[in-house]
Amino acid sequence: MTCFAVATSDSTEAHARLREIFAAFEGDSRPAYCVAGAELSFAVLFDHARALGQRLHEQTSGGRHKPVLIHGHKDIRYPVAYWACLLAGRTLIPVEPETPASRIKQIAETCGASTLLIAAPGGTDLSGVLSSTSLAMVPVPDPLGPIPEGLRDASQTDVIKDQDLAYLMFSSGTLGQPKGIGITYANLVDFIDWLDVLYPENIEMTGVSGVIRHCFDVSLFELWMSWTRRLPLVALDHADFANSTAYINRLAEQGTSLWVSTPSITRLFLTNRRFNAGQLPKLRNFVFCGEVLTKKIVTALFERFPGCRITNTYGPTECTVAVTSVDITEQHLQADQDLPIGAARPGTGLEVAALADDLPGGELLIRGASVGAGYVGLPEKTKAAFPEAGLYRTGDRACLAKDGLWYFAGRIDREVKIQGVRINLNDVETHLRNLPGVEDAVVEPQMLRGVPHALSAYVLGVRALADLQHLPATLAAELPPYLVPRYWYADFPAGLNQNSKFDRARLANAAADARLRHIHMPSSVAKIAQEEPA
Ligand code: AMP
């Protein structure tokens, strides 16, 4: 187990480190954050964040360090709001503009937030939220305008302890109750320090992509690479997702050298032929997180960007973005197994807890400086997932292989029983992904009166019905019949969820969509499947 230094409860080094990063912005006129039609320099970010930070700081006298919701997306006001919260030592909570007002209210009540920073023009009508809460609404002034008058020097802040919460990320949780994952300043700085290890100064960096929504913590790769190395971040507004060519042109203009994404986002960009080294000669580094990275994506990137570096990382939001990494090589591609998720980052230890089955590996446990503070206001859920301070149970199955690298083997809660047979959905997905023509696949149980009764396969990359029809038999040649899905769907819009991952939750609804091509498995195979539960 790796040792790690636990900050004492009164330590304040983490916030000092953040202020040091921020201090370097002063007077730097290079672009920090670019969206279509607007650009924010580091110098302007410095001036405006300081002023707004002071305003937030003054507010704290009545309700010290109460969290602040940042209502915004990719506007240039967003980084100003973000830094203002950090400087004032106020826990920040990103909230996307399209979030329903009722949910914003729920989030604010769950964490006791006192302020809503409006960092986006338009978006949800918030009047309903504000009339029934005591949230103070503070519009973030346009950073391209003058700095609001009358604000004192923001350098004097309260003492911010390493164990105070830097941010909260809300995920959906069960029963519709939003679950706020708390990450401390110590966690955040530990992540920032890891970036220096992943991309040391001798790796030339000229700019970073900005395709991840801010409510998904993988965006911290983008933001903090930009801020620690003072690189332009080229933000993609999701409203512009359809126009990937315009975005590729903007990346080229800024000389972007690092691409951060989920595999699903990259798959979308690979459909644009201009996503290649000819258009983006400086783009040499790719980092992935959040979902299974497939060999097909890596192969396509090696073809489009010869000699590029592709890093796979893995981690849950509860452990500050990501906890493992590995650079993918030709050897990994040729190996007869999935791609690795890598080795633990410094200060983090990984181990497995045995599971009650005979499958390889076990539940992955994470220990160390990356492990967050738990779920705000949910002591029982926190106790279950964080059985002790600095230890998190991921709910993921993983194995440590002889090559010293960890391999992800799916969620442990993705096992279902159909007609008495235990089926690991992940196992079926893995086989499907490797079939010719299949770019990605999701397998879900079809429910009948609340009980799983058959498997459905949703296949990306296959468009023609004739091609889809071949897949059940091809899969049946590799797997026992009870693992071959009964229902097959293809040619549906590959929707992304808020975290830019393949939207599994929407698939069942998509299945009802008439545009979907679907087949039932040939009855002969279906019959075998029913007769042969092993
Ligand atoms: P989130 O908290 O939304 O970031 O989701 C974390 C979960 O995403 C993990 O527990 C894994 O199930 C999955 N995940 C993250 N990174 C990877 C990866 N590189 N490969 C496979 N699954 C991943």
Image: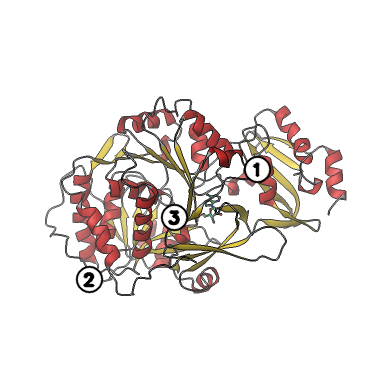
Quadrant in which the C terminus is drawn = bottom right
Which residue has dot 3 on it?
Answer: 321
Q: How many discs mark residues in the rendered view?
A: 3
Whether tag 2 and tag 1 are in contact, CB under 8 A, the answer is no
The amino acid type of the residue labelled 3 equals Val
Task: Depth check: give the residue in front, 267 or 364.
Answer: 364
Task: Depth check: give the residue in front, 98 or 367.
Answer: 367
Task: Depth check: give the residue in front, 521 or 424.
Answer: 424
Q: Position of residue 255 (x, y in %)?
A: 32, 33
Local crowd size for mark 3, using a 10 Å CA cut-off: few (<14), some (14–19), many (≥20): many
Q: Is residue 416 visible?
A: yes
Q: Residue at x 37, y 54 (%)?
A: 126
Identify the secondary structure beneath mark 3: loop
Local crowd size for mark 1, using a 10 Å CA cut-off: few (<14), some (14–19), many (≥20): few
Dot 2 or dot 1: first in sequence order is: 2
The amino acid type of the residue labelled 1 equals Asp
Dot 3 or dot 1: first in sequence order is: 3
Residue 375 drawn above or below residue 121: below
Is residue 7 toward the left or the right of residue 331 in the image?
Answer: left
The disc at residue 336 is: 1
